[in-house]
Structure formats: C-alpha cells, structure tokens
Image: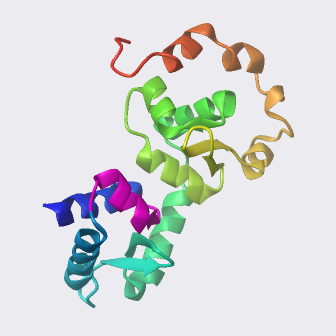
C-alpha cells in the first residue's frame, strides 16, 4: 500500500520530489521509502514500460521512457501549438489578474482541478512556476512570452486590471478557511 501511495504522489506531482519530503509528509522511515522506490524502479524501469522512475540528487520523479522521447516530444509540441481551450483561457486570465497565485487558489476560483491546464500553459511558456517560501508551495504568474503574445508590456494594461485584481468577492473567496462553505 505504501508503494501505491508513493507512486500516486509522484504521478500527481509531475515534478521531482525530495525523498526527505516523501518521508516527512507521509510519515515513513527511510527504509520504507527506499523499499518502495526500489519496487517502483523494478516494475517500471524496463524497456517495455512507457514510464520510468528517475532518481537524482535525493529526488525522484516519474518520467517517460527515454526510448519514447522523440514521439513524446512530437506529441507535446503538437498539443502545445494548437489553440487554447476555454478552460486554459480561464486559467490564464485568473493567473494574469490574480498572480502570483497557487494551484489550490486557482482551483478554488474555477471549481475544478487545473493540473493538466497548468502543465500545458507551462509547456507553451505562457506561465512560470516559482516556489513561494511564505506559502510553502509553487505559485504561478504569466511569463514575458505571454505578455509579448498578447501585445503588451505590462499586466496593468489589461482591460479593467485593477478592478479584477482587487475584486472583493474573489479576495473573500480566497480568504475563506478550508472547509468553510463557499
């Protein structure tokens, strides 16, 4: 069961995770985590598996098999070059007007999971992800590339920027205690 949990966490995170964080957040010993990681490597790191576990400098991440790298790159390039979907545009708008903003805050405003949308916006280069030391989690904001793509040099030039940035209802929603009714 521990192996399943670690595997699910690595899949959901979609980025490198420190082994120390796995131990700390899942309240596991170093030996239990090591055993689970070794089990995942045994099951996934084969020529026939499309997913591998990469371990480097005390971090682990689920990645695509290097043998499929060229095809994965082609797919992602095609996926990132098409038009933005309505959910992507909504997410990008939220980040534009309320960034830097965390994934949970975006999801609170939109009401749905945004993991894939954020990944696609990162791939396109429209947003950047940075670790916020005060919030202890990543925050998202629009990139210079996005500003160039929409033909502006400053977010403040967006329509009704200040009104949306400081919208009282959105601010109240973001300040709710977890578990409080929306």
Viewer-proximal residue among 56 and 20:
20
Query: Residue at the location (46% across, 34% down)?
Result: 104
Position of 167 relative to 156 (above/below): above
Magenta-drawn stretch contains 27: yes
Q: How many marks?
A: 0
Image quarter in which the C terminus is found? top left
Instruction: Name the one closer to the observer, 164 or 158.
Output: 164
Q: Is residue 112 above or below residue 3?
A: above
Q: Residue furthest top?
A: 168
Is 5 on the left-hand or right-hand side of 137? left
Q: Nearer the viewer, residue 29 or 135?
A: 29
Could you say which quadrant of the image residue 18 lies in? Answer: bottom left
| Residue in the image at 49% along x and 74% along y | 74
> What colouring method underlies this structural image?
rainbow
Residue 114 image point, x, y percent: 43, 41
Q: Residue furthest right?
A: 153
Region of the chain picked out in magenta, as a range? 14-28
- Position of 121 with respect to 12 (left or right) is right
Among all residues in the image, which is located at the extreme left?
1
Front residue (pair 12, 4): 4
Residue 105 appears at what percent x and percent y? 50, 30
Residue at (42%, 50%) from the top-left corner?
A: 116
Rendered location of residue 93, percent (x, y): 61, 31
Does residue 94 sit above or below 44 in this rendering?
above
- Coordinates of residue 35 in the picture (x, y in percent): 22, 76
In magenta segment, residue 147: no
Q: Residue at x 43, y 74 (%)?
A: 72
Quadrant in which the N terminus is drawn: bottom left
């Amino acid at each position: 069961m521990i192996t399943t949990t670690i595997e699910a966490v690595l899949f959901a995170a979609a980025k490198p995770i420190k082994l120390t964080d796995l131990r700390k957040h899942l309240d596991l010993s170093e030996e239990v985590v090591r055993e689970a990681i070794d089990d995942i490597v045994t099951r996934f790191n084969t020529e026939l598996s499309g997913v591998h576990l990469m371990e480097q400098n005390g971090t682990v991440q689920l990645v695509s098999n290097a043998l499929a790298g060229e095809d994965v790159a082609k797919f992602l390039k095609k996926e990132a070059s098409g038009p933005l979907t309505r959910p992507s545009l909504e997410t990008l708008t939220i980040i534009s007007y309320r960034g830097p903003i965390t994934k949970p805050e975006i999801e609170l405003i939109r009401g749905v999971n945004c993991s894939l949308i954020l990944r696609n916006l990162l791939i396109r280069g429209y947003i950047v992800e940075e670790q916020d030391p005060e919030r202890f989690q990543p925050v998202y904001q629009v990139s210079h590339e996005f500003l160039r793509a929409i033909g502006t040099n400053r977010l403040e030039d967006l329509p009704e920027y200040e009104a949306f940035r400081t919208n009282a209802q959105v601010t109240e929603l973001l300040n709710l205690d977890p578990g409080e009714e929306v």
